[in-house]
Image (tube, coloured by chain):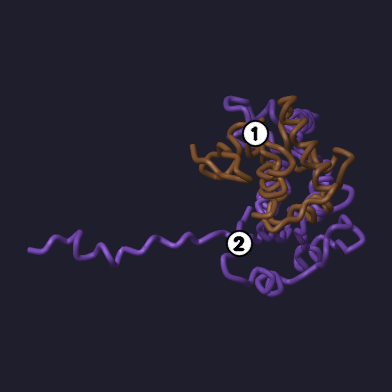
Chain colours: A brown, B purple
Amino acid sequence: MDTLTINNATIKVNEEGYFTDPSQWNEEIAVEMAKKENIDLTDKHFEVLNFLRSKHAEEVPLSIRKVGKSGIVDIKEFYKLFPGGPLKISSKIAGIPKPVSCV
Amino acid sequence: MEDVKEMTADKVVAKEKKEVKKIMVICARGNLEDVYAALIMANGALAEGKEAKMFFTFFGLDAITKNKADHLHTATVGNPAFMRGLPTMIGGLPGFEALASSMMKKEMDKLDIPPVTEFFEMIDAGGGEIFACKLAADMFHLKKEDFIPEVKDIITVGQMYELAEGEGTHMVFI
């Protein structure tokens, strides 16, 4: 287990940089995490991040298909908002573990 | 005798990670499981931020043909991996293949795996490109209108190799 220091807060992360404790997340931290991925978060980004967090809290398995059917974004938009691996990048920024999915 | 470890210590260079940057998936089969393997390989690459292109040939054309894409079957005769011990005579009974295929589709549906046409929409939305083989299309008398809208073009094997160009490209043959 490693730690990241963001805005004077010490965040527990795993070796890939994913939060091990989702409750340590807040919106300011998300902005900093996103900057590391060269993404400037907009309201649309936050809609997706909150969707991911709520699904994770409900223990619903996540996949790109689910996000595309969420009604918040379609798959094309999802790839545009988080380029280079939308689900793995957005879940890192959302402070949830990397989803295990093949779809 | 000098210590070998000491001699080479400075010269030890960390092995460079050779990432897969792009894949060209060639699908020559029209079985349900083979087509899905190809789709998952391509979509999985896109989901990891890699480039993916697909080339369908011979029976793979079924996967991109409008009226066949969502009606693919898995073999129940001559397929030793399907239900070990299943007598060939049973596997060949009328309707058995359709039933087996439908059961497989139901299991995939439970795992949130989309039907073939929707899967192609996802791959297209993720930036993947789909191509049909000219030779096979001519052989089966198929034209661009017969294919799903996501098919970008009907191309030759030479053009396919051009599209596969680039460092870190891997060819996947199914």
When asked about the image quadrant of residue A20, the answer is top right
Q: Regarding mark 1 in the picture, which secondary structure is present there?
A: helix
User: Which residue is the site of mark 2?
Assistant: B21
Mark 2 is on which residue type?
Answer: Lys
Is label 2 or label 1 in front? Answer: 1
From the viewer's side, name the closer residue of B71 and B79: B71
Residue B24 locus on image (x, y percent): 65, 61
Q: Chain of mark 1?
A: A
From the viewer's side, name the closer residue of A16 and B147: A16
Q: Is residue B165 left or right of residue B115?
A: left
User: Which residue is the site of mark 1?
Assistant: A24
Q: Is residue A77 left or right of residue B101?
A: right
On screen, residue B103 above or below B18: above
On screen, residue B76 above or below A42: above
What is the count of numbered marks?
Answer: 2
Q: Chain of mark 2?
A: B
Rounded to the nearest angstrom, the CA distance separating label 2 from label 1 is 33 Å
Residue B28 in view of the camera: no
Q: Bin the neighbour count of mark 1 within 10 Å (Cα to Cα): few under 14, some 14-19, many 20 and up.
A: some
When asked about the image quadrant of residue B104, the answer is top right
Residue B9 locus on image (x, y percent): 25, 62
Tell me whether circle 2 and circle 1 mark residues in contact (CB < 8 Å).
Answer: no
Q: Residue at x 74, y 34 (%)?
A: A53
Residue B67 locus on image (x, y percent): 89, 48
Q: Bin the neighbour count of mark 2 within 10 Å (Cα to Cα): few under 14, some 14-19, many 20 and up.
A: some
Mark 1 is on which residue type?
Answer: Gln
Q: Quadrant of the N terminus of chain B?
A: bottom left
On screen, residue A14 above or below B11: above
Residue B161 locus on image (x, y percent): 65, 71
Q: Regarding mark 2 in the picture, which secondary structure is present there?
A: loop
Q: Residue at x 74, y 52 (%)?
A: A82
